[in-house]
Image (cartoon, grey):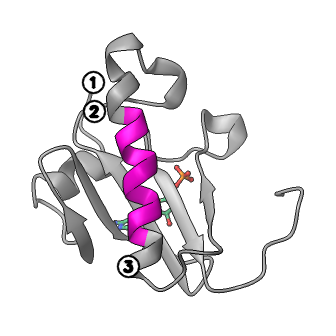
Amino acid sequence: MTETLFSKIIDREIPADIVYEDDLCLAFRDIDPQAPVHILLIPKKPIVKVADAVEEDQVLLGYLLLKAGDIAKEQGYGEAFRLVINNGEAAGQTVFHLHIHILAGREFSWPAG
Ligand code: AMP
């Protein structure tokens, strides 16, 4: 996988407002927030998009979901938050390193745009 903006954030080549980090993942505030809380949670493993994940990523993907819930709780929004994963350009993905958007702090409508 080629270097992306997010791999550069993992490597500290680009600054970010990091809110959580462990051996498997990193979470930082989105530079263009779409809600009062807008955090991106990424695996350190460079998976391009959900559709590229493989069976050995099963535990990692579950871990990310649990961690997303923990982060929403830590931000004070454990009861109401939205998780978004854009998979592929036509679905709105612009950075090709899998990431979960954690959005909270406002009302969300459905369907998503
Ligand atoms: P997506 O469109 O799902 O690929 O999401 C990419 C997200 O990355 C967008 O919400 C951008 O605002 C965000 N983003 C782009 N560059 C940065 C950066 N340097 N630091 C934090 N977030 C960024």
**Residue marked by disc 2:** 46
Image vertical order of residue 37 relative to residue 54, above or below: below
Tell me which amino acid carries mark 3: Glu
Tell me which amino acid carries mark 2: Pro
Report the magenta residues as a range: 61-71
Are circles 1 and 2 on residues that touch, CB within 8 Å? yes
Neighbour tally class for label 2: few under 14, some 14-19, many 20 plus, Cα within 10 Å: some
Residue depicted at x 48% and y 86%:
76
**Residue marked by disc 1:** 1
Reply yes or no: does residue 66 show up in magenta: yes
Q: For this view, does 102 lie left or right of residue 23? A: right
Single out the mark in the foreground, 1 or 2. 2
- Point out the image quarter for the N terminus: top left
Single out the mark in the foreground, 2 or 3. 3
Residue 27 rendering spot, x and y as whole percentages: 31, 63
Reply yes or no: does residue 29 show up in magenta: no
Residue depicted at x 78% and y 81%:
107
Cα separation, mark 1 vs mark 3, equals 32 Å
**Residue marked by disc 3:** 74
